[in-house]
């Protein structure tokens, strides 16, 4: 890519249609502080709610994303698209895996031992 868009105000996302973290409302102007709890300090009810949301994510198809099920070559240079729907949970797992692996650069170059999911260069 040789250019990108930049969201305005408190909007974010690939289409600037989501609020930045910590903001809600139709114009993303209402501040909402969230506190991430340590799972071992959650009450039984909080743990049950957390597990329920994980299970919901496993049953909810992503409204925005699909995944490629073949290479560009296997897709006949794009004329035979090979994509599949993905649920929200598996999308998160796939993105985490992709961000954690070696980075393939131009040509045969590989950036090894880099982990964009847990640390930045």
Image: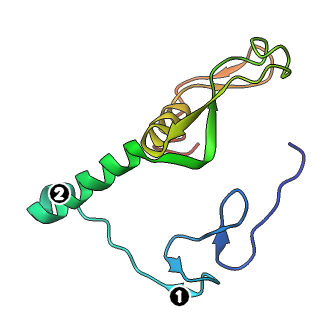
Considering every residue shown, the one lying at the far left of the view is: 44
Q: Could you say which quadrant of the image residue 68 lies in?
A: top right
Please report the residue visible at 65 percent of the width from the left and 84 percent of the height from the top.
Answer: 27
- Spot occupied by residue 12 in the image (x, y as percentages of width and height): 65, 66
Pointer 1 residue: 30
Distance Cα–Cα, label 2 vs label 1: 28 Å
Determine whether the residue tagged by mark 1 lies in a helix, strand or loop.
Answer: strand
Image x and y of residue 117, in percent: 49, 42
Q: Which mark is residue 21?
A: none
Residue at point 66% right, 60% down? 13
Above or below: residue 112 compared with residue 19: above
Q: Nearer the viewer, residue 32 or 116?
A: 32
Q: Quadrant of the N terminus?
A: top right
Identify residue for label 2. Answer: 48
Residue at 45% over, 47% down: 60
58 with respect to 39 (left or right): right
Q: Earlier in the sequence, mark 2 or mark 1?
A: 1
Q: Write the residue at 85% across / 17% down.
A: 77
Quadrant holding the C terminus: top right
Judge whether 80 appears above or below 30 on screen: above
């Amino acid at each position: 890519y040789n250019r990108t868009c930049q969201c305005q105000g408190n909007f974010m996302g690939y289409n600037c249609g989501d609020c930045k973290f910590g903001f809600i409302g139709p114009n993303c102007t209402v501040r909402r502080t969230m506190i991430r709890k340590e799972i071992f300090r959650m009450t039984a009810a909080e743990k049950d709610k957390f597990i329920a949301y994980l299970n919901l994510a496993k049953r909810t198809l992503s409204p925005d994303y699909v995944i490629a099920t073949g290479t560009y070559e296997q897709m006949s240079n794009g004329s035979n698209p090979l994509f599949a729907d993905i649920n929200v949970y598996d999308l998160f797992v796939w993105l985490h895996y992709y961000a954690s692996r070696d980075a393939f650069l131009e040509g045969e170059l590989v950036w090894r031992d880099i982990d964009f999911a847990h640390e930045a260069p």
